[in-house]
Image (cartoon, helix red, strand yellow):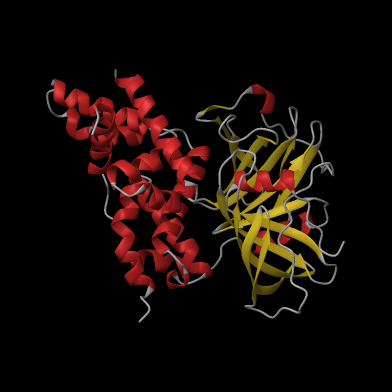
Amino acid sequence: MRSSDREIYEKHAADLIRYATVLVGPDQAPDIVSTVVLRVLKRRSLGDLDDPKAYLFRAVMNECRSWGRRRKTSRIALGRFFEREASEPLDSTVADRVSAAEAVWRLPPRHKSAAYLVYWLDLPISEAAQILGVSTGTVKRYVHEVRERIREELS
Amino acid sequence: MNDEERRIRTGFGVLTESTPPAPAFEEITKQKKRPPIWKASYAAAAAAVALLVFVATVVVDGGMRLAYAMEPGLDLTYTVNGETTVADETIANAPAIVSYQVSDASDGLINVEITYQPIEMCDECFPAVTFTQTVTEQGEIVSIEGLVDGSEIPEFVIPTPIPHAGISGSFPLFLGPPLPENELGMGDTWATNEDGLAGQHRLVEQTQLGDRDVVIIESTYSFTQLEIGEEITATTRVWFDPAERVVVQAQITRQQAWLDKMVETEFQLNG
């Protein structure tokens, strides 16, 4: 039996909102996800999509990139990430976490997406490539460049 | 796992800790039932631009996006709400894509967002220039805010109240998928397989824009090996005038793909 729109959305909603949060921050993420899902639903059922997860992830990334072009880069959103850290003494462990998060946050969207899919979700390169709509070689290049950049920034 | 990978994971760990709850499905579908706010203004503006050569109109949910290719020194005028000339702009620098996004704001105001992007630049190497005008229903411009990649707009593109319009014919715009030879009915689908233009297309609607009868074709393209050296997938809606067999408007969800398509392909619908 084909899944309903609700079932498909609820199956992927947590992943989508987390992905959008990483890309644009927690304040904007719900709007991004709503916009993307609404846009799809106005045209077709989610069940009509060959691979709803890949399609929705890609749509979220595109929407985040469009949003990022139109808006000031979100230091505000970044601040939200560190509310918890700021309320605690900034020992070396916390400082490391903050540095790592800031470095990751500053990555370009597609690099950040690739790194998120590969290093956080532990997806195979091939699946990350399918979600991003790029070749596996491109994903490998993205994650290589991310590693290089993180090494430079945090060394 | 090496140090860099560990730090990347740590970074994502911190970022994901702030993840808010996902919107409920009901909240999203509630928005779907709202009537289109900009239907009237959209139709009027679309009719106006349809008279121009090389025009692509992009329709977005709850708003409108217009995109033009222009040469330096040319001016542009556009209309919102079918009666108000809202903004004009002279392209002072390189040939550029000019896109307008019109959306509703609170208190009867209209937000008009205008983005410039030089044609020969990719979006990774040059920031799009965006500024936002807030306009009352009477057409009064009440504020202008400019951004370039998060910074204030530079002087060379500061919008000034301006004159009129010229659209360059020098740049082939993206103009949609080839139609199949057989006659199409609503809901029919077809595929194209050309290099760089592989996609699935569907005839979704027949409607009227201004005094023009048009059909809407929704397409999903897979672009491969474009100039920026990577694969791009984009969704496109293309509006055809079935009588004149010319494209009057097109939408694509990713500007970069649209740019690449635009510079690479000129599509003709039976001339």
Residue in the image at 51% along x and 68% along y: A42
Residue in the image at 28% along x and 43% along y: A120
Question: Looking at the rendering, which quadrant does residue A38 occupy?
Answer: bottom left
Residue sitting nearer the eye, B179 or A32: B179
Side of B131 where B195 appears, left or right: right
Report whether residue B154 is seen. yes
Residue in the image at 75% along x and 28% along y: B92
Residue A109: where, in percent of width, then height?
44, 39
Residue sitting nearer the eye, B201 or B40: B201
Q: Quadrant of the N terminus of chain A?
A: bottom left
Question: Looking at the rendering, which quadrant does residue A108 occupy?
Answer: top left
Question: Looking at the rendering, which quadrant does residue B252 occupy?
Answer: bottom right
Q: Point out the residue furthest to the top here.
A: A155
Residue B149: where, in percent of width, then height?
53, 30
Q: Is residue B181 above or below residue A142?
A: below
Residue B82: where, in percent of width, then height?
72, 57
Residue A62: where, in percent of width, then height?
49, 48
Residue in the image at 72% along x and 78% along y: B184
Residue sitting nearer the eye, B226 or A111: B226
Side of B267 where A1 appears, left or right: left
Side of A141 where B173 appears, left or right: right
